[in-house]
């Protein structure tokens, strides 16, 4: 089996390649835009406040105010979910996740094959 230094070098090389991958770089760009979007930050803060309000109104038994807060939550959630940047971000996140899962599966298969070969060789 390869020594730890060789394995670490290969892992570092893979990480470097992933950082340069178009799917990953696009995801990182969109993630940055989402985190720094003034509109999304304002909507998120408004959503948090509406959630706090709903909990507080429920706690004090103010049913009508609670219903209004829940309506605000639904409207804010929908506006965030339908925002084009969020849609693009989620789509790219799924693509990046699929890429990483595929890579992980490939590595796992190679390791399993290696273990099986080693096991069979030790029997002979």
Image: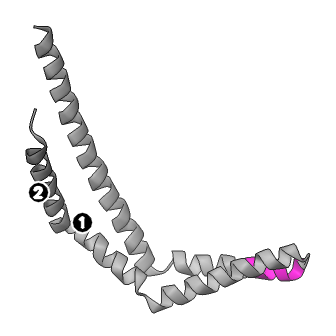
Q: Which residues are magenta?
A: 63-70
Tell which circle, 2 or 1, labels the residue nearer the N-terminal end: 2
Q: Quadrant of residue 17?
A: bottom left
- Nearer to us of marks 2 and 1 is 2
Q: Quadrant of residue 69?
A: bottom right
Q: Judge whether residue 64 is colored magenta.
A: yes
**Vertical comparison of 110 with 95: above or below:** above
Residue named by callout 2:
13
Q: Main secondary structure of the magenta part?
A: helix
Q: Is residue 69 left or right of residue 35?
A: right
Question: Where does the image place residue 50, in percent across and percent down from the top left?
Answer: 70, 82
Residue depicted at 36% across the width and 75% down the height: 31
**Vertical comparison of 93 with 47: above or below:** above
Residue 71 visible to an observer of this rendering: no
The crowding category of the residue bearing disc 1, from other C-alpha atoms within 10 Å (few below 14, some 14 to 19, many at least 20), is some
For the rendered model, the colour scheme is one colour
Residue depicted at 9% across the width and 37% down the height: 2
Residue 100 visible to an observer of this rendering: yes
Q: Secondary structure at mark 1?
A: helix
Q: Secondary structure at mark 2?
A: helix
Q: Is residue 104 left or right of residue 13?
A: right
**Vertical comparison of 31 with 17: above or below:** below
Q: Quadrant of residue 63?
A: bottom right
Residue named by callout 1:
23
- Could you give the CA–CA distance between mark 2 and mark 1, rounded to whole angstroms? 17 Å
Question: Where does the image place residue 15, in percent across and percent down from the top left?
Answer: 18, 59
Residue depicted at 86% across the width and 73% down the height: 59
Q: Is residue 102 left or right of residue 61?
A: left
Q: Which one is nearer the viewer's eye here, 23 or 12?
A: 12
**Vertical comparison of 98 with 16: above or below:** above
């Amino acid at each position: 089996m390869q020594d730890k230094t060789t394995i670490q070098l290969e892992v570092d090389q893979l990480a470097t390649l992933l950082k340069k991958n178009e799917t990953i770089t696009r995801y990182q760009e969109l993630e940055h835009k989402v985190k720094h979007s003034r509109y999304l930050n304002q909507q998120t803060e408004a959503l948090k406040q509406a959630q706090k309000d709903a909990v507080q109104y429920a706690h004090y038994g103010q049913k009508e105010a609670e219903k209004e807060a829940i309506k605000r939550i639904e409207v804010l959630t929908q506006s965030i979910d339908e925002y084009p940047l969020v849609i693009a971000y989620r789509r790219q996140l799924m693509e990046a996740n699929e890429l990483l899962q595929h890579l992980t599966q490939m590595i796992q298969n190679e390791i399993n094959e290696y273990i099986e070969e080693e096991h069979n060789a030790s029997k002979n």
